[in-house]
Amino acid sequence: MDNPLKAIEEKKLNFFHIKAMFVTGAGMITDGYDLTTGSLVLSLVLSSLNLSLESVSIVLFASIISGNAVGALLFGYLTRKGRTKFYGIDAALMIVGALMQAFVSTPLELALARFVLGIGIGADYVLTPLLMGEYSNRKDRGKLMGLAGGFMWIVGAILSTLATLLALNFFPANVAWRVALASGALPALFVLYERTRIPETPHYLAFVKGDTKELKEKYGVEVGSFGQSLGQRARLLLRSKKLLVPLSLAALSWYLYDVVSYSEGFFGPNKIAEFIGVSGIVFSLIVNAGFSLPFNFFGAVLSDKVGRKVMQAIGFLGMGIPLFLFPFFDKNLAVALVLFGLSNSFSSIGPGNIIAYWGVEMFPAAVRGLTQSITVLGGRLGVITTTLLFPILLESWGVPTVIVMLGILAMVATGITLTLKEMKGKSLSEVEREYLMDTGEFTAKSAGSASESSDLK
């Protein structure tokens, strides 16, 4: 098969790519913002609503993560009908869910608000990497997906820390946590309009919708007809071992990553920070601004040069070793902070950057929304595991033992990563060829170049 989208995939990095990165990345800012705020105000919510640690964990975290799972599966399925068709809806859900938190008076109301918020964020976990991947050029796809994903998440976490600090200084405690949580609506609000105007992706038009007219008008390329319907191709693909094995491994790697990273993220600014003798806000700022953000940026850039698999494997290993060493230095504040900083640095440079690539890059367009939603679901199950088990383990085993366990899980994830397929420098159209061309499911007519009217020019 000649690549009908070659001219688009070989374009140099341009303004459209950068704009798309910010418009799509706003959802990740919202996620990082809201989950970090939840961890920072955990003790205030606990006392304000008279909850135990286990109960407040369910109200603040299990609710939003359950919403993530629902949003990922629902919107992953809906991407068959269009990548951008529902892109404003997820932002609207994030805005409504965040604002609802300002007016709650019971744990049930707070859990419901965060569930609504979680649906929007879960949808964004599918749509942001999918859209960014299908808009990107081949050579810069890794850095664009990384910056729109993990990097923006950390930006959201830092903004959340600063906003929480301001809220605590200007409002009484019972109001401050509501203001901090509700302010998470701002990132999604800023991009709601742009999300309703963003164009449909060329890969969807070429390989899913098969809309020759729109593809030619927007991107200046032509694609022939498909031999089977989308539904027939999707069912065939989902029964294929060629798809199921790598999909399962990708989802498992995300599961393990979220078990480890969210255990640190949810409870680090309170229980772990308290254990080593530093305030939660200081702990969060040091870890995110001093370690995570710069390393995440370099990880995004390096993913197109070094490769996804190598970066993620190194990242998991670098996460695990400092955590494994933690009990030997847990009484030394400076060393404990450095160990957590190193763990977060390697997390950012590796899986924190790359974990969301696999569901998009390894699979063809007909099922890409679904494969991405399944890998997201793997991650959300990891967060739910953390939410339900981590408070119990902290109480039963103590901080040092639990941290060692997390280090071991990170090392296991290193081995799983090495089984995944390297996607560095590979065009998404090559993925179509690998999965579909052998069965003669479609033919494509390539165009020599994209027209000057292309949205990606």
Image (cartoon, grey):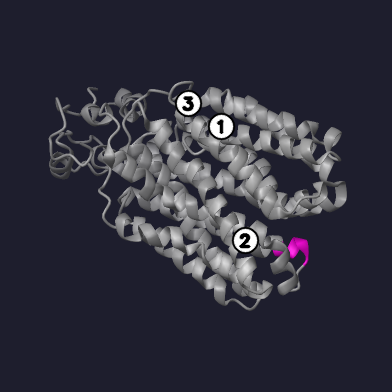
Circle nearer the N terminus (1, 2):
2
The location of residue 99, given as percent across then percent down, is 50, 70
- The residue nearer to you, when weighing 41 against 308, is 41
Upstream in the sequence, badge 3 or badge 2? 2
Q: Are marks 3 and 1 in contact (CB under 8 Å)?
A: yes
Please tell me which residue lies in front, 229 or 354: 354
**Could you tell me if the residues under marks 1 and 2 are in contact, i.e. CB atoms within 8 Å?**
no
Residue 113 in the image: state x and y as whole percent.
55, 69
Which label sits in the foreground, 1 or 2? Answer: 2
Q: Mainly helix, strand or loop, the magenta region?
A: helix
Which residue is identified by label 3? 302
Dot 2 falls on a residue whose secondary structure is helix
Q: Is residue 299 above or below residue 166?
A: above
**Magenta span has 230?**
no
- Circle 2 packing at 10 Å, graded few (<14), some (14-19), many (20+), is some
Which residue is at a point 72% across and 52% down the rendered structure image? 267
Q: Which residues are magenta?
A: 52-56
Q: CA distance from mark 3 to mark 1?
A: 9 Å
Instruction: Report whether residue 385 is seen.
Output: no
The answer to whether 37 is drawn above or below residue 6 in the figure is below
Q: Is residue 129 visible?
A: yes
For the N terminus, the image quarter is top left
Using residue 195 as the reference point, say whether residue 294 is left or right of it.
right
Of labels 3 and 1, earlier in sequence is 3
Q: Which residue is mark 2?
A: 165
**For residue 168, side relative to residue 12 (left or right):** right
Amino acid type, callout 3: Leu
- Residue at 66 percent across and 27 percent down: it is 317
Report x, y in % for residue 250: 54, 34
Q: Amino acid at mark 1?
A: Ile
